[in-house]
Structure formats: structure tokens, C-alpha cells
Image (cartoon, helix red, strand yellow):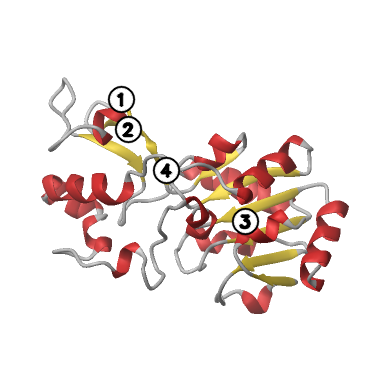
Amino acid sequence: MDQNIEKLRQWVAESGYIVFFGGAGVSTESGIPDFRSVDGLYNQQWAYPPETILSHSFFERDPEEFYRFYREKLVVRGARPNAAHLWLARMEREGKLKAVLTQNIDGLHQAAGSREVLELHGSTLRCYCARCRRPYPASFINDGTGVPRCDCGGVVRPDVVLYEEPLDQDILRRSVEHIRAADMLIVGGTSLNVYPAAGLISYYRGSRLVLVNRGVTPRDGDADLIVRGNIGQVFSQL
């Protein structure tokens, strides 16, 4: 077994309050493309950059194009939890993992059985009317065409955080509380380039900050342990 993976296994065994912070790389092994890799969503060609289409101002200005992009690129069908999701759910059942903080919007952590999942950027599995806040099933958007409308006339939108929109303050508060209480923080599958979410790891005060990632991140110098590789493959060895 790789020396770093063995050290990670040992730290997991010794820890009692593990928190996991993850990004798109957690779901790529389930067939969901990430955003920033060479073949990722942000490197594909559209009439507008994806960052523009997924902004609040663009949603307000051109909802037809927003929903065309959203249904084609963000609604994922048939994806199943991979080894990373399943390992995290098992650690929670065993009482070692206390929370999953995720930037993903695919709901795969819950599908794997995780219960304390803080979705920093929302979920494609929920939607609501932007005017009256009435909730709707995700299929109302995902399986429809054009701009979905509520009975009140408002636009029904996905419960995801768009660019230019703030993160949910309650989710941020709970995330900070978990990170501050953690004796081990595992960060995986994320470039740590998306703020404010990436800034959350600065609240960790312990001595077991672990980065599990295929490539380098801006926070590598802060890590107590770095494991290179696909996160599902790494967790499968623990």
C-alpha cells in the first residue's frame, strides 16, 4: 500500500470527528463531467461562456437559453454513487464522519446513504417558484421544455446557487461549525479555486488536513498530508 494512503488509513482509524469537503472530482467517477478540466464543461463551446449562462443576470435576461443549457449540461440522468460516495456514507454510519460539505449539485451523496450533507451550491433535485417560493418536483424543470412557469406566473427555477448569488447563510454557518469541530478534514476532488466555498477550509484548526486530488491546488502548502489520485480509487484502499 502507498505510504500516504497507509497514513491516511491510520488517521481515519484514530479520528472521531471527520469532515469531508468535496468538489466535482468526487462525481467524475460516476460519469458526471467536471467544470475545469481539459474536457470539462467550461472548456466546451457555447454562444456564451458557461459562467455567463449560469449567472443570475443571464437567467433573468435570457431564461430560454439558460434552460436549454441547464437541461443539456447540468441535468444528469442515470448517474450512480461511486466508491467515494459509498465510503463516506459508511464512515458516517460508523460514527466517524460527521458531515459532508459538497460543491456538487447532483445529490449522489444522499443517494449513497449520507445524511448530514451540506450542499453549498444547491441541488438539481429541487426547484421552486422564484416569485412565490412554491416548491416543485425536479421533473417540472428537467423533463419540460422552454421556460417553466408556476401557476402564479413566476418562473420556476432550480434550487442551485448561480453566479452573482450568495450562498445560503445557514448552510455556511453549519459548515463552519463542523469544520471548527473536526479533528480531521479531508478535502477531495476540488480545485479549491471557487470562492467563497473554498475559503471554508481556513476555519480548520486541527493538524490533519488531508488533500486527495489528482492535481495541485492553491492550498497544497497548508496540507498535513497529500494523496494524489482519483478519490474513489484512493478511498477504496482504506
Along the polypeptide, which appears first: circle 1 or circle 4? 4
Along the polypeptide, which appears first: circle 1 or circle 2? 2
Along the polypeptide, which appears first: circle 1 or circle 3? 1
Left or right placement of residue 63 versus residue 88 in this view: left
Question: Where does label 2 land, which residue?
Answer: 127
Left or right placement of residue 99 versus residue 110 in this view: right
Q: Position of residue 196 (x, y in %)?
A: 47, 60
Question: Where does label 1 land, which residue?
Answer: 136
Which image quadrant for residue 228?
bottom right
Question: What residue is rendered at 26% in x and 37% in y?
Answer: 157
Which amino acid lies under the numbered mark 4 shown in the image of this protein?
Gly
Alpha-carbon distance for marks 1 and 3?
Answer: 33 Å
Question: What residue is rendered at 31% in x and 56% in y?
Answer: 163
Closest to the camera, between mark 3 and mark 4, is: 3
Classify mark 2: residues with Cα within 10 Å, few (<14), some (14-19) or many (20+): many
Question: Where does label 3 land, which residue?
Answer: 232
Alpha-carbon distance for marks 1 and 2?
Answer: 5 Å
Taking the image as drawn, is residue 207 in sight? no
Which amino acid lies under the numbered mark 2 shown in the image of this protein?
Cys
